[in-house]
Image (spheres, coloured by chain):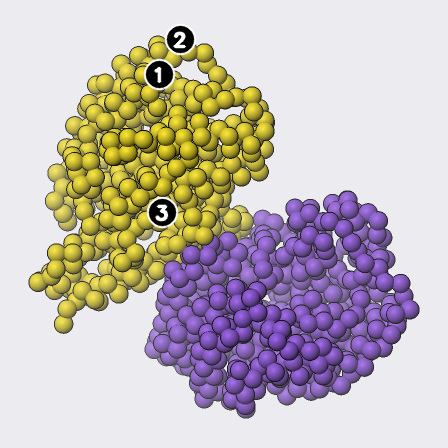
Chain colours: A purple, B yellow
Amino acid sequence: MDAYPKLVERFAQISRLDHAMTFLSWDQMVVMPKNGNDSRSAAIAELASVRHARLTAPEVGDWLDSATGNQLPETARSINEMRRVWRQEACLPADLVKARVIAGSACEHGWRTQRLENDWTGFLANFREVVTLSREEARLRQAHADFDTPYSALLDLHCAGDSQALIDSVFTKLRKELPELIQQVMEHQQTAKAVDIVGEFPVQQQQQLCEKLMAVLGFDFDAGRLDESMHPFSTGGPGDQRITTRYRNHEFFEALSSTAHEVGHASYEGGLPEQSRGLPIGASRNMCIHESQSLMFEKQVFLSRSFMTFFTESIHQILPSSAGYDASAFWSSCTRVKPGYIRVEADEICYPLHVVLRYEIESALINGDIEADAIPEMWDQKMTHYLGLSTQGDFANGCLQDIHWTDGAFGYFPSYTMGAINSAQLFATVRSDFPDWQDRFARGETGFLREWLEQKIWSKGCELDSQELMVNATGHETDPSHYLTHLRDRYLKELY
Amino acid sequence: MDAYPKLVERFAQISRLDHAMTFLSWDQMVVMPKNGNDSRSAAIAELASVRHARLTAPEVGDWLDSATGNQLPETARSINEMRRVWRQEACLPADLVKARVIAGSACEHGWRTQRLENDWTGFLANFREVVTLSREEARLRQAHADFDTPYSALLDLHCAGDSQALIDSVFTKLRKELPELIQQVMEHQQTAKAVDIVGEFPVQQQQQLCEKLMAVLGFDFDAGRLDESMHPFSTGGPGDQRITTRYRNHEFFEALSSTAHEVGHASYEGGLPEQSRGLPIGASRNMCIHESQSLMFEKQVFLSRSFMTFFTESIHQILPSSAGYDASAFWSSCTRVKPGYIRVEADEICYPLHVVLRYEIESALINGDIEADAIPEMWDQKMTHYLGLSTQGDFANGCLQDIHWTDGAFGYFPSYTMGAINSAQLFATVRSDFPDWQDRFARGETGFLREWLEQKIWSKGCELDSQELMVNATGHETDPSHYLTHLRDRYLKELY
């Protein structure tokens, strides 16, 4: 008898457990009161352990072996994706999985206070254990598949299909060109009058404005919601995409940009193929593609001159205190380039250098070339080198600023910049497929873009590899030249 | 080797799965967008099935047998409670459990429309199957333990330890005395001027007022939160008690009373013994005790003249449109007695008769003395007899008003009134232990009551049976005379 239906049922079970963990984690980050953390972490760890047992039970390996025979091509692909998910999990012992969840959860929980208190020492006490367990994880993953370094084995979890060689070559080009481009753009922008948007922008109004933006971008509120959290993120499951943003009283573009960004992530998840729901073949491809979708909505749509011109009417209507500024003032304030300490506040040109820095540190850390206590000094040196800013003694604005490392998500950072590059490349094709794209954006039309993305990316799930997706949609593999052109067109020529 | 530690670990696992289901259900009822429902229900069903398998695995029965030997008394009690939980789950075949969930779900789903359309015939078509399966369930539960009737076997799920004989004797006294008391109080209240609190009370202000009330009642916002839902409820786990209320624009006492009520439930859960967290011995005792805690905060504290006098300042401050009414107007509007059709809207004197009516009908139904089609006529006769109100032809305001029977929760209703009686009895002891209780309430002090309840009830978990708890706290078993005295003191003498 064919083992494939058994695999389908098992993976459907696993997706139901994933659903539970996803929404318990959302709750933990968005609404849970602080004293609930111990029980919550224990419950999530328990589910992770049930999931691990279901996925790595001996019969799954047997089914994967026996299901390899005569299959339709799409079934063979589905089995391949199952095998990838299975191998990623089966190569780790249950004890390590559980220890990692508990240590990550404790470190993340502590970080929420330690970051505010600039407490590197307190953080380090928890973080050492996270690093130890992540190295052990990387070592085991490397032993079970063909990776050149332990770090590559972690990279595979987030950027699967995009080799370290590809990432290295892309980052080398950025490292080489961006510092000079930053100087050129800053010089160019010195000649333009700087506009500061100042005022009081009540959080409730900002929230209403974000919901308006979501509606224009095509978000379905019967299948998702917007909430507030310290660090914006998106998560969810079929029919239920949860995005968050954060608000500041004196500034509203951060909330709007984050919202547009997370709408991109949510749209990808919401557009995945229904017929393979709950199966690995029906999941999103990797984070380099995922981030290309969020940056598509944030940088290519929301930050375009044409869309911002359209949306300015809503801004004026919902935030009366913004009435003194026009679309061009908004656009120029949003496209100001200036090196800063905080990655999530960085502009399009500086951002990749924040990522290159983290990539260099985390790969050295996981490969055992440095220890965790060396991080603050490396951070300071690289920030000074790439962006001319020292972080000496300032951990809050340095190595404590990001949540990623707290629970061991090493190998994730590169996807931000690979995503930016994919996004610019995909949008170059959109521009040539829809020469009137600026007129459409100026009327608030985004449906044509959503349809294009749904057809080329979302509905494909994992039917294609990441580079096959890019070739299929744009004609060639990930290439940073589109991104560099995009930056020059926007920031030096001010074309869109 | 002793099997007890194995049992402890297994029940801790089960409590972690319960935690997951609890918070996924909270999310489903409070924040989930509607398109998320299918995946959510599937995920919760998956966890229920994992839980069932863990609890009823053959080794659990073996461990319970072999752990019965030489044990400390507290261990023996702990094992007894484990056995009770295990037996309640293990005595039902998986087919019946599944059939019950499907029939209950269909009946509840249909009821949501049928109630609005006064469609008893449509409801009956689904409900007959629910009754058949509940009778089968009751028969099996009776066969696996020592219950005098099938109904007692269902009663045990909600009112464990309070025998049907006890409930019968309590309800007989209420049936005899309450109808006359209602007449006396209505006559007495005719002489007083009726005050109607009218105005517009914005939801946001009401929410702030509810949070103020929670703070005064000792709710810890680091260990819980308040939200809004269609029907108020409370749920949660260690360090995280979630309560909900609902708001209406023209009335604010419903939101406040519900909030006080749910704070009582949440306080009990939050005060359970830490050392036996996650074990059956560390759980709340039964719903007759649970409801005594919610009614303690709702009826004995919030509805007392002294507390309401204190809290009126907050009401005036946070709801400016209430300024025209004083504490005495608030109190008299909240203590109006008038028979009505709807249980959840009933006052303290009429409420028990609604419960007695349901108890009489559901016990006869489960024990096979009547069939489901007899319900409307019995309902009409009893409502006419107890409260002077006929429900002939009016099913929506009669036997279709409650959700409980739709999914087979027979044996639950008695706990509402047993809780009211326990609450009055416990509070009679509090009054004699703290003769200055009214002065304390008038200053907004509630800590003394919380400490007393924590010591006598909350911290005991399931270490004592329900009647042992009552004897330990008040000197004797559940006795309705305290409740009747409370009603006369409040509604005829207007003492507090």
Rendered location of residue A398, percent (x, y): 62, 74
Q: Quarter holding the N terminus of chain B?
A: bottom left
Using the rendered view, name the quadrant where residue B191 is placed. top left
Q: Which residue is mark 2?
A: B191
Amino acid under disc 2: Thr
Rendered location of residue B21, percent (x, y): 39, 54
How far apart, in angstroms, are the residues tagged by discs 3 and 1? 35 Å
Q: Earlier in the sequence, mark 3 or mark 1?
A: 3
Tell which tag, 3 or 2, sits nearer the viewer. 2
Residue furthest right in the image: A191
Q: Which residue is mark 1?
A: B389
| Secondary structure found at label 3 | helix
Question: Relative to A59, is A242 above or below?
Answer: above
Amino acid under disc 3: Ile
Return the residue nearer the eye: B440 or B123: B440
> What subunit carries mark 3?
B
Rendered location of residue B196, percent (x, y): 50, 18
How far apart, in angstroms, are the residues tagged by discs 3 and 2? 53 Å
| Secondary structure found at label 2 | loop
Rendered location of residue A320, percent (x, y): 77, 44
Q: Residue at x 23, y 53 (%)?
A: B281
Q: Which residue is mark 3?
A: B102
Q: Is residue A276 left or right of residue A458?
A: left
Tell which tag, 1 or 2, sits nearer the viewer. 2
